[in-house]
Image: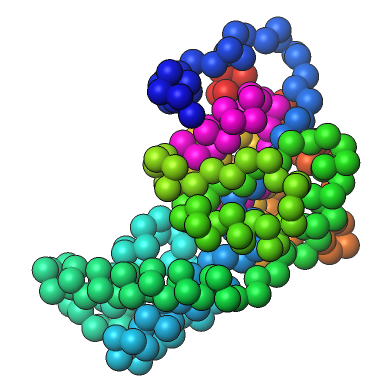
Amino acid sequence: MSTTRETTWRAGRFWWDSAAPAGAQYPLRAIIFDLDALTDIECDGHRVAYNAAFAEHHLDFQWSVTRYRQLLALPDERQRIAAELRKRCVVEDADVLTAMLVDEIYHTKTMLFDELIRERDLAPRPGLLDLLSEAFAAGVHMAVVSNGQRGWVEPVVRQVAGDGLVEVVITAEDGYKPMPDAEVFRAALWELGISAVHALAITGSAVGLRAATAAALPAVVITGEGTPDLPAAAAVRPDYAGDKPLWVADCRNLHSRWWATHKLTAA
C-alpha cells in the first residue's frame, strides 16, 4: 500500500465519501470476516496455548472454554492473565513482580501458540463452507482480518476456507492498530475498493464487534455457543448452520435492515 493511499484511508477520505441520495439502497458487495468467525481460534488455539504456558510456569490451573470466553471481554491479553492471577490469589496487586510474571506467561504462550497453530487441525465453524461457496458464486467479495501474525494467519485461512475464495487478508502485523480499533476493517474495505455501506462484517467476539462497529460496518457475531445479548450486532448466532443456516440472502437482509436504521453519515 502506497504512503498516499494509506494516508488517504487513515484520514477517512475515500472516493465514495460523497453523500448518497436519501433512501438509496446499498447492495451487499462484500463480507469481511474476523478470523475467529472462520474457526474458533480463541478457544481452540489461544486458550490451549495459554493452558500449556500456565503448566510451563508451574501454575496449577487451566482455563475452561467458559472462563476463557468471559475473559475475552478484556481486549488485551495481558489484562486477561493479570485478572486470572488476581482471581487465583497468585498475585495481590498490580506491581512490578506481577507485571514481570504476566509478561513471562504471555511470551511463553506466544512461543507455544506459534508452534501449536501450525500443527493443530482447526475445523471451520459449522455451516461456514456453505456460506463461503455461495458467496463466491454470487460474486460477493470476501476478506479476513486478524490481530495475529501473517505467517500463521494465512495458513489458517487456507486450512479452514480453502484456496481462492478469500481475496484479501489484513493483519495487525501489516502496520495497523489491532482490534478493537477499526483500522484492520477499514484497510480491508480499502483493499477491496468497497465502501462500508456495501459490506457486512462477521466476527467471533465482542472485541471484533466493537472494531466493526467503529468502522461503520453492520456485524453478525458468531459466538460458538449460546446467543449473548449484544445489542450493537445485526445478529448473534452460535454458528452458520442449525435449523436456519446463514445464507447470502440472509446476509443481504441483515445488511439492508441495519442500514435502514442507521444514518449514512455513520459510514
Stretch in magenta: 183-207
- Please state the horizontal and vertical placement of residue 120, each as a whole percent of the image: 60, 76
Residue located at (77% from left, 19% from top)? 25
Q: How many marks?
A: 0
- Please state the horizontal and vertical placement of residue 159, each as a whole percent of the image: 68, 63
The correct choice, above or below, for 91 with respect to 13 in the image is: below
User: For this rendering, which residue is in front, 175 or 250?
Assistant: 175
User: For this rendering, which residue is in front, 73 or 138?
Assistant: 138
Q: Quadrant of the C terminus?
A: top right
Residue located at (32% from left, 63% from top)? 79
User: For this rendering, which residue is in front, 260 or 10?
Assistant: 10
Res 229 seen here? no
Residue 237: quadrant of the picture: bottom right
Residue 232: quadrant of the picture: top right
- Please state the horizontal and vertical placement of residue 241, each as a whole percent of the image: 82, 61
Q: How is the image coloured?
A: rainbow
The correct choice, above or below, for 188 with respect to 198 in the image is: below
Judged left or right of residue 97, residue 106 is right
Q: Is residue 189 magenta?
A: yes
Residue located at (50% from left, 57% from top)? 151
- Please state the horizontal and vertical placement of residue 243, each as a whole percent of the image: 88, 62
Examine the residues drawn in magenta and state their main secondary structure.
Answer: helix
Res 103 seen here? yes
Residue located at (29% from left, 86% from top)? 57
Q: Is residue 69 magenta?
A: no
